[in-house]
Image (cartoon, helix red, strand yellow):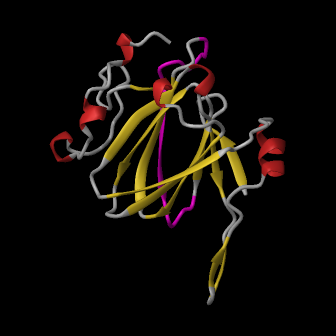
Amino acid sequence: MKIEETHLKGCFVITPKIFQDERGYFFESFNKNVFEQETGINVNFLQDNQSMSAKNVLRGLHFQTGEYAQAKLVQVIKGKVLDVCVDIRKKSPTFGQHFSIILDDKNRKQLYIPRGFAHGFLVLENKSIFSYKCDNFYNKESESGIIFNDKTLNIDWDFPEDQLIISEKDLKLPQFRELDF
């Protein structure tokens, strides 16, 4: 597998080596030793989550605060998404900057998102299955987020806003400038 750091410190794109023949395919989706050797990050995933979403669904931008902050390793099992993460580490030189990537069931790329990032994704194919490993357990009281169309972040979702399917909860998320990181 190939592991490359994005312009956001500690955020990595992982491209697996896929072995394919007439039977199908095989690839190593995660190897703790390789990950630690290539990134210098010792991660211990504790929880796996999976969602299935219709086309046009936008989930996010979500994060957990304090002791319940989470690092995530995200990937698409089936379908295609535009995945976005935002650096919300106040002391980071890339604070307030974002990174986006297409993740799908063809490229099989994954994105490692460290603690101190907000995360969201836009579903580009119907019934897309999205999977993510977390290094900390979910805690409802620690959940927070940023509205997807925040003008400060200026994320280009490359999709008509009036066609997005967004939960009421996500539509009520605060602006980036309203949060105290």
Residue at (29% x, 57% y) in the render: 55
Query: Does residue 98 show up magenta in the picture?
Result: yes
**Quarter containing the N terminus:** bottom right
Residue 2 percent across, percent down from the top left? 71, 53
User: What secondary structure do most residues of the magenta stretch adopt?
Assistant: loop
Residue at (77% x, 47% y) in the render: 35
Return the residue found at the far left: 162
Q: Is residue 88 visible?
A: yes
Query: Does residue 167 show up magenta in the picture?
Result: no
- Vertical arrangement, residue 167 with respect to residue 2, above or below: above
Residue closest to the eye, 181 or 12? 181
Residue 130 percent across, percent down from the top left? 47, 55
Q: Is residue 86 visible?
A: no
Residue 16 percent across, percent down from the top left? 67, 60
Residue closest to the eye, 3 or 58? 58
Return the residue found at the far bottom: 22
Residue at (27% x, 52% y) in the render: 56
In the rendered structure, the answer to whether residue 25 lies left or right of residue 174 reads: right
Q: Which residues are magenta?
A: 91-108
Residue at (58% x, 56% y) in the render: 109
Residue closest to the eye, 165 or 39? 165
Residue 179 percent across, percent down from the top left? 41, 13
- Vertical arrangement, residue 76 with respect to residue 66, above or below: below
Residue closest to the eye, 60 or 16? 60
